[in-house]
Amino acid sequence: MNNKLKLLVIFLATIYSCTEEPKKAEINISDDFATLLNNYYEESLKLNPINATTAGDYRYNDIFIDNLSEANITKSKAHFEYFKKQLDSFPNESLTQSEQLSKSILAWECTINLAEFNFNANLTPIDQMWSPNLFMGQLASGSSAQPFNTTEDYKKWLLRVEGYLDWMSSAEQRMKEGIKSGHVLPKSLIAKVIPQLNSLTNSNIEKHLFYQPINKLPDNFTDTQKSELTDAYKDMVTNKVIPAYEKLHKFMSTEYLNAGRETSGIQGEPNGDAYYAHQIKKYTTTNMTASEIHELGLTEVARIRAEMEKIKAQVGFKGDLKAFFDFVRSSKELMPFNDPNEVIANFNAIHERMKPQIEILFDVKPKTPFEVRRTESFRENSASAEYNPGSLDGTRPGIFYTPIPEVEKYNTYSDESLFLHEAIPGHHYQISLTQESNILPKFRKTLWYSGYGEGWALYCESLGSELGLYTDPYQLFGMLGAEMHRAVRLVVDTGLHSKGWTREQAIQYSLDNEAESEAGITSEIERYMANPGQALSYKIGQLKIQELRKKAQEAMGDKFDIREFHNQILETGCVPLALLEEKINKWINE
């Protein structure tokens, strides 16, 4: 080899080494970062095994973590501290744009959860709507996320119930601590919890909620297996579940009820203002203050009232708007059903009507199946309509639950907007597409940020006319009513928790500005009392998505494609609103 050739070889080798080494480093960084995200997801499932079950991951179906124990609180705190610190090992310039977004989301997740430890939410672990005992009731029914297909499934549930009973015992101890420190539920909420607990002290074993899986034993089980499981479940319900509920019911109906707060908002608890500020940030994923949100709510209420006046005039109603609310609430023409199955059929008919138009707005649709079901009777009287996600693998359907406690009084005027929100294209599209993604890391497939998730669902209500719905003025009024409901929430939630409003003041403000029934409004106000800040997320998120759509349309003009806009919103999964806005701005600029 001559000298010139040697120099050429050396030169080429130098170029090769310079170009290949950064690639190798980048690959290692990406691999390490992916490992970190996956480790976070796996460790999170161990801390919250119920989340694994709902996602269709059945490895931990026998475990219920008592997250009220000091040991598990310490574990949870260490979990978030560790992964937040690990993120420092990955500078942004070493990550792709998608990885940077994952880093920002994980940092947010760790920070907001660590902040929660500064407060005393664990001293009020049970309420009438949000607490783990209610979801365990759903699982116990045998018709929810917990599978009952094999003998192993049945045995795993027996073990999970043992852990749950430990949690119930810890819950009572925490509430006793709360009594001493002033962290207790308002009396009106305790009064709603008491009958829920009492319903599970029923000594008729075969009708007990926790016995229901035995009534659904698969035919392929042997007689011996059926007999052994029946005996085990009878023992579980008789000697463990019923005594636990009797004990907790006695405590809550006496000592705890007597200690209940007379105040309605979280201001009535020590450090309530700081906790509410945290809840606002957690649920809206913004830095808005309670006062800013209250004023925004008043503005939105005034705007929507003006739109409602137009509908009132269109149908020829002569009274004022409040009288029109009363008319809509009580109109027998809007209460046409005598059988709960008719309510379910009506929602399925709404779905059929919108199918021809859905292609215009969405070119990516979920594969996960979808069903409409009636809310279980044990929680129906205090439940709202809701969506329960399908499994990650799509084998369990997404389910839209609707409560029908008194079918003759079921009012249909808001059914179209309700379906768009809770079902399609609302929560079912958003959650299912996230879970089905081949791009997102696992931890992002099961994240939930209310500002994004509920904001998307409320935004979907505004798509009704584009989907061929709202041709009936009462259904259009129902959409406005649903939007008003979320605008009213901005006013009453901040009123309750930052301005000293009473439960009765909040109920009256709602009655003055929306057409929901008094019973429904009362249930809603008590919902906000139980979970400060959550009700703010809907309108804040909706307004942000509408703002981003308008911005994109104005910037792109004829090049704007509504289907691509929806893809951009949905493809990232749940993200804090500031990160969503940053993403959409980049898309517009590109």
Image (cartoon, helix red, strand yellow):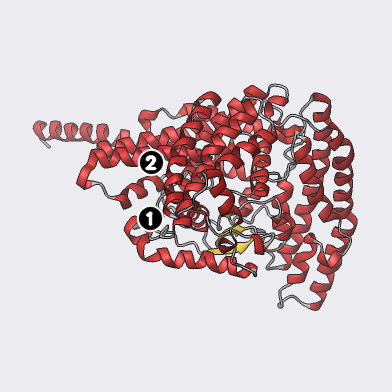
Provide the residue designation for mark 1.
Answer: 465
Q: Which mark is residue 204?
A: none
Look at 55% across and 58% down and name the residue there: 390
Q: Nearer the viewer, residue 489 or 572?
A: 489
47, above or below 55, in the image = above
Q: Nearer the viewer, residue 196 or 162?
A: 196
| Contact? badges 2 and 1 (CB < 8 Å) | no
Which numbered disc, 2 or 1, marks the residue that appears first in the sequence?
1
Disc 2 versus disc 1: distance between alpha carbons?
Answer: 15 Å
- The answer to which quarter of the image holds residue 122 is top right
In terms of secondary structure, where does tag 2 sit? helix
Instruction: Please give the name of the residue rendered at 62% of the width and 25% of the height, measured from the top-left corner.
Output: 498
**Front position in the image: 44 or 540:** 540
Q: Amino acid at mark 1?
A: Ser
Question: x, y percentage for residue 133?
Answer: 74, 48
Q: Amino acid at mark 2?
A: Gln
Of the 4 image quadrants, the one containing the C terminus is top left
Q: Is residue 425 visible?
A: no
Q: Residues within 10 Å of mark 2 (few under 14, many from 20)?
A: some
Query: Looking at the picture, how far across and down is residue 315, in whole percent?
Result: 45, 55
Q: Quadrant of the N terminus?
A: top left
- The image quarter in which residue 22 lies: top left
Tell me which residue sits at (35%, 29%) in the image.
93
* Above/below status of 247 relative to 184: below
**How busy is the neighbourhood of tag 1: few (under 14 within 10 Å), some, or many (20 plus)?**
few
The quarter holding residue 341 reads bottom right
Residue under label 2, please give it. Answer: 546
Q: Position of residue 574 (x, y in %)?
A: 48, 43
Label 1: which secondary element: helix
Above or below, 189 against 151 in this view is above
The reply, left or right, for residue 533 in relation to residue 309 is: right
Q: Position of residue 382 (x, y in %)?
A: 70, 50
